[in-house]
Image (cartoon, helix red, strand yellow):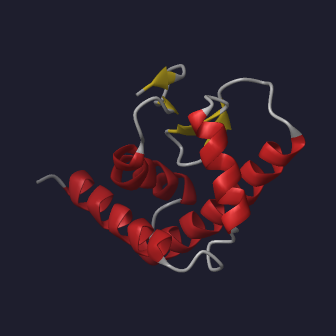
């Protein structure tokens, strides 16, 4: 296994551990999660390769935009903490989270945006 692969696994493990913590720790309310889950199912919101949520379409109401902002703020905090523990950038931690955690949680019909690509439906 290459050094880069070991680092990616270590970063992914740190991010996974942080994401398993209680929702209050990652600044994500149940209401925001439910709103985003509905928006994902409707094809409005998707997962991006940087580890953050993004808008598949520009037509999102203020409640969805607020929920996405809340969850992305929580994820940013998790990525900063993981980066500090692993000695990488927050951006690398977010990308590792996408590879190690987010991709495996995508449901059929949900959208994702790989690095350098456009939105794709699972």
Q: Is residue 76 above or below residue 56?
A: below
Residues 3 and 50: in front is 50
Establish if 119 lies above or below 21. Answer: above
- Residue at image point 54% right, 19% down: 118
Q: Quadrant of residue 70?
A: bottom right
**Which residue occupies the foreground of this view, 47 or 78?**
47
Is residue 117 visible in the rendered image? The answer is: yes
The residue at 52%/59% (across/down) is 89
- In the image, what residue occupies the spot 72% across and 58% down? 32
Q: Check the picture and name the quadrant holding the N terminus.
A: bottom left
Furthest toward the right, the residue is 62
Q: Nearer the viewer, residue 118 or 29?
A: 29
Residue 73, visible in the rendered structure: no
Q: Which residue appears farthest toward the left when viewing the image?
A: 1
Q: Give residue 54's position: percent from left, percent from top.
A: 65, 37
Percent x, y for residue 60?
Answer: 80, 33
User: The C terminus lies in which quarter of the figure?
Assistant: top left
Check the image and report above or below for 109 versus 85.
above
In this picture, residue 66 sits left or right of residue 86: right
| Direction from residue 60 to residue 36 in the image, left or right | left
- In this rendering, would 2 be left or right of 89? left
Q: Is residue 40 left or right of residue 97?
A: right
User: Residue 63 location, x and y as percent?
Assistant: 84, 47
Give the residue displayed 48% in from the left and 74% down from the top.
Answer: 18
Where's residue 49, x and y in %?
49, 39
């Amino acid at each position: 296994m290459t050094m880069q692969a070991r680092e990616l696994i270590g970063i992914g493990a740190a991010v996974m551990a942080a994401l398993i913590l209680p929702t209050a720790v990652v600044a994500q309310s149940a209401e925001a999660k439910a709103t985003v889950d509905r928006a994902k199912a409707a094809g409005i919101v998707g997962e991006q390769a940087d580890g953050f949520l993004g808008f598949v379409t520009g037509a999102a109401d203020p409640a969805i935009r607020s929920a996405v902002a809340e969850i992305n703020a929580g994820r940013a905090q998790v990525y900063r903490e993981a980066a500090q523990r692993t000695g990488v950038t927050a951006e690398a931690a977010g990308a590792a989270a996408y590879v190690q955690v987010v991709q495996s949680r995508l449901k059929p019909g949900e959208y994702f945006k790989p690095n350098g690509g456009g939105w794709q439906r699972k």
